[in-house]
């Protein structure tokens, strides 16, 4: 088994302590950071499928997520690009009721590498908190809201509509597995992206 396959297999079963070393070995073996990241994203899809079929439960999902986060820590310096450009500050968070943060963290890393200063509000962020953060921070040009559950899509809508109703001059980008471009448009978001890489491209486009 190659090191990258081993990373994928060990993330799936949540071998948190082994992951940083294995990710480094996969890099040493010549795998790219992007390929290793994709392998870990694939692991999470397998974990999700096993959860849906009742083969594993929330604790197993959680340790797999922790293992992936450790792997991302090793890749972060390699994935983050030139951060010298200044496109302003981006407030990012996962919406109220939603605790998923791996995708949000990847999106944050990629938007940062596109030239934004990031302020990460974490998970389970109420709509009003996004507005407060825009007011508390300097030169906020963008708010990025992530939602991973179909049940928290209304919270995504509330976040976008609360930010828009505040009259603040910021663009809002949304995304997350259940979110579609149609839904993003329907709730009044300025932009949508299906993944972290395209979120960075869209973020730049929105504030240009
Ligand atoms: Co949860 N969970 N989970 N979970 N979990 C999913 C999302 C699920 C699809 C699993 C499944 O059933 N197959 C399912 C949702 C079903 C649905 O809504 N239709 C689900 C469920 C049901 C739940 C609970 C309700 C389970 C329960 O308690 N019974 C519960 C809810 C808790 C809550 O949030 N209130 C729950 C809990 C958890 C854990 C806490 C155990 C853990 C999260 C830990 C953490 O994040 N720190 C967890 C995990 C790990 C998952 C899966 C397995 C993996 C998620 C992940 O990190 N994926 C997930 C199954 C799956 O995704 N296939 C699942 C990897 C990540 C890189 O991808 O987050 O999609 P993703 O991010 C992508 C894109 O979506 C996009 O870019 C990212 C990178 O390319 N993106 C954006 C994300 N945000 C964006 C923002 C943007 C643009 C793009 O602009 C701003």
Image (tube, helix red, strand yellow):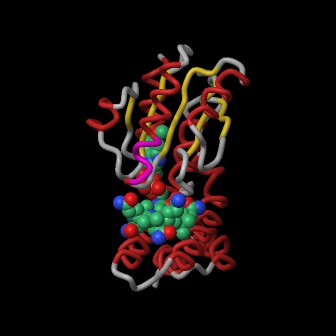
Residue 38 visible in the current orientation: no
Instruction: Give the extent of the magenta segment.
Output: 151-155
- When the figure is inspected, residue 176 is found, relative to residue 72, above or below; the finding is above
Write down the quadrant of residue 44 in the picture: bottom left
Please give left or right for residue 153 compared with residue 19 in the image: left
- The answer to whether residue 169 of the structure is visible from this angle is yes
Q: Position of residue 164 (x, y in %)?
A: 48, 21
> 120 or 25, which lies in front?
120
Q: Main secondary structure of the magenta part?
A: helix
Tell me: 36 left or right of 19: left
Q: From what the image shows, is residue 34 above or below residue 92? A: below
Q: Residue at x 40, y 85 (%)?
A: 55
Which residue occupies 56% across, 54% down? 101
Coordinates of residue 120 in the picture (x, y in percent): 66, 41
Report the front residue among 121 and 42. 121
Residue at 64% x, 33% y is 83
């Amino acid at each position: 088994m190659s090191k990258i396959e081993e990373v994928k297999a060990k993330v799936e079963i949540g071998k948190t302590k082994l992951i940083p070393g294995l990710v480094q070995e996969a890099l040493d073996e010549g795998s790219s950071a992007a390929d290793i990241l994709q392998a870990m994203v694939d692991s999470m899809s397998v974990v999700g499928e096993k959860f849906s079929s009742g083969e594993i439960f929330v604790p197993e999902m959680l340790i797999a997520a922790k293992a992936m986060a450790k792997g991302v820590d090793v890749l972060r310096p390699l994935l983050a690009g030139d951060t010298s450009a200044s496109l302003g500050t981006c407030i990012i968070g996962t919406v109220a009721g939603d605790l998923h943060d791996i995708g949000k963290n990847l999106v944050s890393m990629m938007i940062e590498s596109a030239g934004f200063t990031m302020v990460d509000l974490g998970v389970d962020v109420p709509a009003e908190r996004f507005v407060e953060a825009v007011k508390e921070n300097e030169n906020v040009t963008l708010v990025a809201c992530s939602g991973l559950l179909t049940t928290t899509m209304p919270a995504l809508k509330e976040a976008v509509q609360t930010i828009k109703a505040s009259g603040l001059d910021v663009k809002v980008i949304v995304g997350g597995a259940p979110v579609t471009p149609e839904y993003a448009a329907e709730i009044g978001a300025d932009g949508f992206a299906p993944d972290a890489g395209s979120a960075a491209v869209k973020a730049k486009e929105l504030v240009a």
